[in-house]
Every structure is written in structure tokens, then in C-alpha cells.
Image (tube, rainbow, N blue to C red):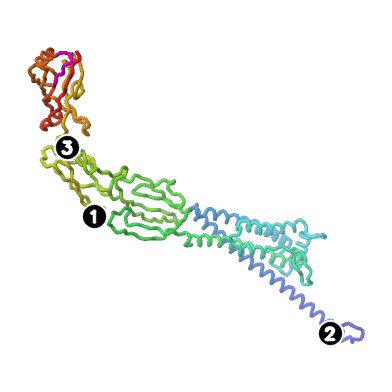
Amino acid sequence: MAGGKLTARQKMINLMYLIFIAMLALNMSKEVLSAFGLMNEKLTASNLSATERNITFMEGLAEKVEEQPEKYKPLQAKAKKISELANGLNDYIGEVKSDMIATVEDPTQYEVMDKGDFLDERWFGPNGPKQEGKDFLDKLAGFKDGVKEVLGETYPEIISGVEKDFATEKIENKDGIKVDWLDYHYKGFPMVASLTKLTQLQADVKKTESEVLSAMLQGQLTSEVSLSNYEAIVVADKSAFFSGEKFAGKIVLGKKDKTLKAHKVIVNGEELPAESMQEGQTILDFPAGNVGEQDIIGEFQFKEGDSIIKIPIESSYSVIPLPNSAVISADKMNVVYRGVSNPMTISIPGVASVSAKAPGLKASGKSGKYLMNVTTLKAREVKIQVSGKLPNGKVVSDSKKFRVKDIPRPVGTVRGEDSAVKMQRSALNVSSIGAILPDFDFDIKLKVSGFKFKVPGQPTVRVSGSRLNSQAKATLKKAKRGETVQVFDIEAKLASNSSYRLKKVSPIIVELTN
């Protein structure tokens, strides 16, 4: 423009044109610097809002942990690790920015932040990055790797974003040459541009923290509502049914959650101990109670925020007699005896109390226990009728016949021995005469009130009581060695029921040994 062939006037015009261009360039540079500064302000404000959101999230998570520690404590542990990583990198970048701004008199005058000397001298040397520059790169890599370690393979989209936002590999410039990431972004740039880029990195940190925390909570909620966590549960209208009844109940979906733990569980007026609440379920362990319908009444209590949510417990079950023996009946052995109180056990499975009726039958005090006395009954059979009310209100009844028999024929004894006995004369003199019921199911005591005594060749002697009288002893002296004497027509009665007439007592044959 200032060639020698130009006139002075043209030279002046050209010079003024160059000055005008320079002035335009100067104004544009100031506008660009101000634009970077305004962008930095907006990013800083956005970062403050993100920080508040993340703090609020952690506080809310802490409340959830207090309410349901088993469910939310593992989630809180991961969230804390992410927050520690984010806060560590954010604080480090903040220190770099503070050192940078400290070199400027008025940090709000972005037009004067047109030099790049601060980072150029702090991070770069003649042979590549200085130690401070390497520390900056290590901080970025540590944050990226730490987030990936916490997340594992759970959230691939977030991990992909973190790898992209915090990548520090070489970058190809406009000339097609690959240069170091640190050089490409920060070497030779105006201070305000580098400041804005660092603030943008802080925004990426906050964004990553927010995304991870939200994704983990959303993943927890999604897992909780997933149908794979439910199972079909059959709930019967009652816990016991009788043959011939229709089954009545419903099928509901119950959620399986081993981490769920109630704040308090009350059943039938008693608070269950903490060890009863295991892996999302409450273990019930208490005596079943008496035979019949039993209720289970109570409530679950869960903490939710500042409130206690109560869920009622209403159920019932049936208690039936313990099946500790088989029911085996010998039809020919259904017998009751006259003269004794026959013990009976009468019940209907699943019925708490029954009504039993028959001649001579009465309750003995204990549930299901009876005594039956048929001494005065002339019939040869007796029928016991039983009825009871089932839990559903239906009345059931049944009956059974028993044969009525007399007590078997007693057997006479001397010195406790029956039938044919060998003994000395002197022993017989002092021995008592008795009667027994061998192999009889009842332990019955018989009382002898008299008998007849016969020695061969001598008149029969009638004796009162259970021992030989003087006349019988005198007759015994006349018996010879080896002879047999007889004790017969023994009169015996039941010790507990003197009105009952026993059958005739079998006699005793005694062989004298001297």
C-alpha cells in the first residue's frame, strides 16, 4: 500500500485505512474477552445451583438411611465416594482459578485478562508440561477412573460421558498435527479464556456428580417396583379346612425385599424383639394356644420422614389336637365293664370343645376326658353320642357303640399264689386267703370276707374273714402229709364298690408238704 508509485494523498488514505482496521480489531478483541468473562459468570452461577442440588440430594439420602438403613446404606456409601471425588477435583480447580485471579487487580475487568502468562509459566516448560501441569492432568484422570470404579458396569452411558468430558489424549489441531491436550486447550490462551474453560470443567464435575446420584436413586426405585421382586402368595380365608368344605381364599402379589425392616412390630399386644425382623420379613414364634380358632392382631410401624406409617395385621389360624398317635380301633374290643369307672377320651379334631352323652358318662374335669360307669345298666350295649361346633359354625355329630361286660371271674389265692399250691402246714395256718383278677386292664382291689375250708375225711369248715379260724386250724392238724386241702366258695367284693356282685371265685388246692 505504501509503494513508491503512490501519491502522497493515496499514501495518507492507505495509512488511515490501516489505523481503522487496527481499531476495529482492538474493539473486537475486547468484546471477545468480555464475552468469555460473562460466560464464566453464568457457569459459576450454574455451578452454585448444582452444588446446592447435590447437597440436598445427600441430605435426603441420609434421611432414607435413617428410615431404612439396610436398603439405602449401600447406596449412600457409593454416593459419598462420588461426592468425595467431585469435591476433590472441584476444590483443586478452584485453587488454580484463585491463584490466577490473584494476579489481576480487578477480576471484573475481563478486557485486561488478555495475557496467557500465568498458566504458560505455571504449567508449561521448554520440554513439555511442568510438574504442576502433570498434577492437573493426574487430577482429571483420578476423577475419571474413580467414578468408573464406583459405578463398575452399572451405568455405561454415564461412564461414556465421563470418559468424553475428562479425556486428556492428544488432539489434532487445524494443521492436522496431534498436540498434547494441555497445550491445545491452555497454552498461549488469554487468561479469561482459560478461566472460563476451568469453570466449564467444574460444571462438568457437578454434572457428572448429579447424573450419578440421580441414576443410582432411580435405579434403586426401578429395582423396587420391578415385577421380578414380587411373588404370588396364596392367602386362605382360614388356615384349616375340613373334608367336604370348599377352599376359600385369594392370591395376592407380595414384594420380596430383604432390606426392608420395620421400625416396630406389635402382635397380640406385645412388641416383637429386633431379632424377629430378618431379611425383609418378621419371624413369628409364640405358643399356638388352645384348640380352636385363634386370632393374630397387630400392626407394622415404618418411619417415613417425620411420620410413623402404621399397617394393620389381621389374621387367624386354627389349632387342632396334636396328632401324636395313630387312630387304630379293634372293633371287638370296644368294651366297657360294669363295676368300675371306665376312662374315656372323646374329641373331634379341630373343635375346641365337644358334647358327649351316654348312660353313666360324665366329664372328669380335663378337656376331652370322661368316666363311664355302667354298673346298673342291664343292656348289653351302650351308645356314646358326640357333637361339636366347627369354627365355621357348622355342627358335626357322631356316635359309637360299646359292649357292656361284667368283670371277669376272680381267682382265689393263698399267700398270693393261685390254683394249685404246695406249702407247709404251718405256713397255711398263718396265710391269708385272697382273690385277684389276673390280666385285667383295671387295677382293682378285691376284699375277701369268707370262704369254706375242706380237709379230706373231715367236715367242711365255714370261715369268716380272710384267715383260718381256730376250727379250721384244728381240722388242718388232722390232715396227713401229702394230702390236699381245698379253699372254695370264696366270698369276695370290690373294695371300691361293695354293691357289685362279682362272679364266683375259683377255688384253691393246697398240697401239704409236712
Q: Could you tell which of marks 3 and 2 lies nearer the N-terminus?
A: 2
Please tell me which residue is depicted at 71% across the width and 57% down the height of the picture.
138
What amino acid does circle 2 point to? Answer: Ile
Choose the circle earlier in sequence order: 3 or 1. 3
User: Which residue is denoted by mark 3 in the rendering?
Assistant: 337
- Could you say which quadrant of the image residue 214 lies in? bottom right
Give the label, 3 or 2, closer to the camera. 3
Q: Nearer the viewer, residue 37 or 230?
A: 230
**Dots 3 and 2: beta carbons under 8 Å?**
no
Q: Amino acid at mark 1?
A: Gly
The magenta segment is 480-486
Residue occupying the point 66% across, 57% down: 145
Task: Tell which tag, 2 or 1, sits nearer the viewer.
Answer: 1
Which is closer to the viewer, label 3 or label 1?
A: 3
Disc sitting over residue 443 in the figure: none
Mark 2: few/some/many CA within 10 Å (<14, 14-19, 20+):
few
How far apart marks 2 and 1 lie (CA) works out to 119 Å
- Quarter-wise, where is residue 141 in the image? bottom right
SS state under label 2: helix
398 or 364: nearer the eye?
Answer: 398
> Hey, what amino acid is under mark 3?
Tyr
Q: Is residue 482 magenta?
A: yes
Residue where numbered disc 1 is placed:
393
Q: Position of residue 303 (x, y in %)?
A: 44, 54
Kindly identify the residue that appears in the image at 24 percent across and 46 percent down: 347
Q: Residues within 10 Å of mark 1 (few under 14, many from 20)?
A: few
Q: Which residue is mark 2?
A: 13
Q: Is residue 331 above or below residue 76?
A: above
Q: Position of residue 437 (x, y in %)?
A: 19, 30
